[in-house]
Image (tube, grey):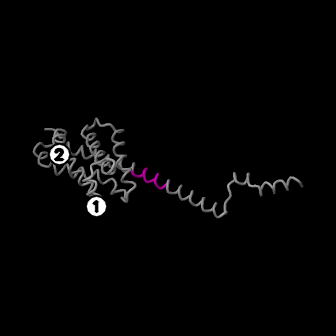
Amino acid sequence: MELKGLLQEKRSNILKRWTDLVLDTYPAESALFFRKQKNRFANPVGHIITEGMEDLFEEILQGDDFNPDNVSTFLDNIIRVRAIQDFTPSQAVSFIFLLKKVLREELNREIRENNLAGELLLLESRIDDLALLAFDIFMKCREKIYELKAMELNNQTYTLLKKAKLIVDLEEQETDPAIESIDNLKEMR
């Protein structure tokens, strides 16, 4: 039997265990909510994670024929959620490595009996590549978050300075009657 066949056969067990391990990376109360609430609108985070992991697993099953654009999209959906939460970069992408742990535990006996260690090694290399891609996506998301925070801080600072009359808009200067009077006086000279 090939590894791909084993993965298909044990798909539901692998996905359930992988999902459980990923949800365990969240605080206990959140993980419980993500597991119990199945409504995608009441639990968008749990839905995105669960659906994204299923889609990722399907792409992994494709072997060398997987679609890199699909993988990027599925990873992006999960990583965006984890990027806005209080995860370090390594914690945010660790969910990918948890798949390797699940695969070894679920398929250990079959891999030894069918001499599939070489195929497993190739699959694990693909999973490592996914982790690197996930890290790149995570960093882009965090950069965007910091950029948005900096822009918001600049806007708040500008608004406060303007309210304190420590800064004047050029547009306001042109329509300010006091400035127009000064300009008129200068022209009379």
Give percent across and percent down for residue 4: 19, 39
The range drawn in magenta is 138-147
- Name the residue located 72 percent from the left edge and 54 percent from the top edge: 173
Marks 2 and 1, Cα distance to the nearest angstrom?
Answer: 38 Å
Work out which quarter of the rendered image holds the C terminus and state it. bottom right
Amino acid at dot 1:
Glu
Percent position (x, y) of residue 114? 11, 42
- Quadrant holding the N terminus: top left
Disc 1 on helix, strand or loop? Answer: helix
Q: Quick check: 101 left or right of 147?
A: left
Nearer the observer: mark 2 or 1; the answer is 1
| Few, some or many residues within 10 Å of mark 2 (<14, 14–19, 20+) | some
Q: In the displayed structure, does residue 105 sit left or right of residue 57?
A: left
Give the label on residue 29, or none. Answer: 1
Badge 2 vs badge 1, beta-carbon distance below 8 Å = no
Of residues 130 and 86, which is closer to you in this image?
86
The foreground one among 143 and 110 is 143
| Residue furthest out toward the top | 65
Q: How many discs mark residues in the rendered view?
A: 2
Q: Using the rendered view, name the quadrant where residue 163 is placed.
A: bottom right
Residue type marked 2: Ala
Against 133, residue 64 (above or below) is above
Q: Give whichever of discs 2 and 1 has the lower sequence position.
A: 1
Instruction: Please tell me the numbered disc located at residue 117.
Output: 2
Q: Residue at x 76, y 55 (%)?
A: 177
Indicate yes or no whether the magenta region holds residue 125.
Answer: no
Q: Is residue 140 magenta?
A: yes
